[in-house]
Amino acid sequence: MSSWIKRTALAAVATAALMGAASAQVTYNRGNTGEPETLDTHKTSTVQEAHILRDLLEGLVAYSAKGEAIPGQAEKWEVADDGKTYRFTLREGLKWSNGDPITAEDFVYSYRRIMDPATGAKYANILYPIKNAEKINKGQGKPEELGVKAVDAKTVEISLEAATPYFIELLTHQTSLPVHKGSVEKFGKDFVKPGNMVSNGAYKLAEFAPNSHIKLVKNENYWDAKNVKIDTVNFIPHPDLAAAVRRYEAGELDSMDELPADQMKSLKERFKDQVKLGPYLGTWYLVVNSSKAPFNDVKVRQALSMLIDREFIAEQIWGQTMQPGYSFMPPGVGNYGQPAYMSYKDQSPIDREDAAKKLLTEAGFGPGKPLKVEIRYNTTDNNRNSVIAIAEQWKQAGIETSFINTDGKTHFAHLRDGGDFDIARYGWIADYSDPNNFLFLVKSDNKGFNYGKYNDPQFDKLLDDAAKELDLTKRADLMKQAEAILMKDMPWIPIMYYGKSNLISPKIQGFVQNTRGVYPSRFLSKTQ
């Protein structure tokens, strides 16, 4: 029998207990930059969806107010001495929002469902560290073979393919949120509709009014309901950031989770410390469709990257809320060290422009035959201003740029469904602080996220070798070699490292800026 290393899980700080009891119903109008495409936790992938789902559902592990991994539905966990088996002990008396008891089998069902190819989960590969997960998801095994089992009603055991240093943090991601089996089986894809959806988090779904709001109400069956101080949370989409600022000023929004960068100076003057700025572990990219001409030519991709003045975009377009990005991963990713930077990071803009023009000439483009590029992007003020600025910079080398813009859910659905494009705007915020969470995006077999269909056997092999390497220093070296390949090939062009900008009303208490960008409503309160 394996020996076990007891890991004492950090207890959640009941900050809400210090906030005082509310005498009346408390409603929080929470701005969200876009609408969810779906509330099926096994089919989502965006940050906007994650904010809502983390209020509705809770996994074995959850996020604290500080964005740290804490006990969720599991009150504690233990790890085998080889790091390959985890046992989670569920809290006493857990219930779904409809009163059904929550058992270990609910988590077994949920993990099997996301791995079942029939579910069509685009983000199932985040859970590939679980034993047999990849094989099952690729149709080479049965869901019953997944390394997740119910030891008894209160104990979930998860076996891994190999020791995975970031596994606990990985379980905070929305793909590990459970679904209610009875509702899924009764309503099919409609199980996420108001009246059908059964949740186990601090809130339950009351209304979903497209282009207006998603209303959540307090779940009286949540294990920590007594410390949830906000009764109703209305998630209100605000892709038009300037209009959202006006709504905030009028008191129609209590918070915004992205600000119009071109107004940053004015916002700071008007709202002072209500403007919250901080680092965010993510990168803003242009994804290049390297599967079609002329973008399958590495010289074209390199030229497009070299012509972009990242300092100008970060400073003038984003008001210094973002930092110029010269690597696939932002600095500060765990288990890694410094990123692998572009070779021309420190070259002057003039030298880069000359080199880019030479590459374009070698690729067959010039005054008589301009390179034509179409950028597809999701509509926000900041995105629009950014791609227009990039097009202006490309114009200096004779590149002609056109645009297609749609709302966020349409844009990301187009990419996930394999729709055609030349270049597409994309952003990636780390789901867990490890280089794998960035580099896996462009593995050749990642059908869910490798939108530009990049394929490099050497890159794939380095990631496969890193997955088997237990020495974290050697693993980091393999990962850096892989990132260096991306910085040469440019299948995704990094533009900026994210910063997080929020407007938070003085009435909202308990907000903590963090690099994960997560602010669970259960830890907040609102004064009247």
Image (tube, grey):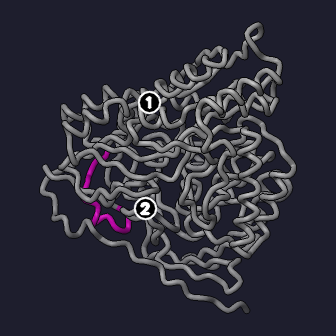
* Front position in the image: 183 or 341: 341
Identify the mark at residue 382; answer none if there is no mark: 1
Which residues are drawn in magenta?
221-234
Q: Is residue 255 left or right of residue 320?
A: left
Q: Is residue 169 left or right of residue 473?
A: left
Of callouts 2 and 1, which one flags the residue occurring earlier in the amino acid sequence? 2
Pick the residue in front: 429 or 65: 429
Q: Nearer the viewer, mark 2 or mark 1?
A: 1
Where does the image place residue 449, in percent across and percent down from the top left?
68, 42
Residue 236 vs residue 197, the one in the foreground = 236
Q: Is residue 48 magenta?
A: no
Residue at point 64% right, 72% down? 165
Q: Amino acid at mark 2?
A: Gly
Residue 179 seen in the figure = no
How far apart in space, not on screen, are marks 2 and 1 (Cα)? Answer: 25 Å
Residue 521: x %, y % from top left: 34, 54
Q: The residue tagged with tag 2: helix, strand or loop?
A: loop
- Identify the residue at horizontal 48%, vertical 67% (top origin): 69
Question: Residue 519: x percent and y percent?
Answer: 37, 54
Residue assigned mark 2: 67
Is any atom of residue 267 visible in this view? yes
Q: Is residue 379 above or below residue 74?
A: above
Residue 289 position (above or below residue 507): above
For mark 1, does the 10 Å Cα neighbourhood hold few (<14), some (14 to 19), or many (20 or more) residues?
some
Residue at figure coordinates x 63%, y 29% from the top left: 307
Q: Residue type at mark 1?
A: Asn
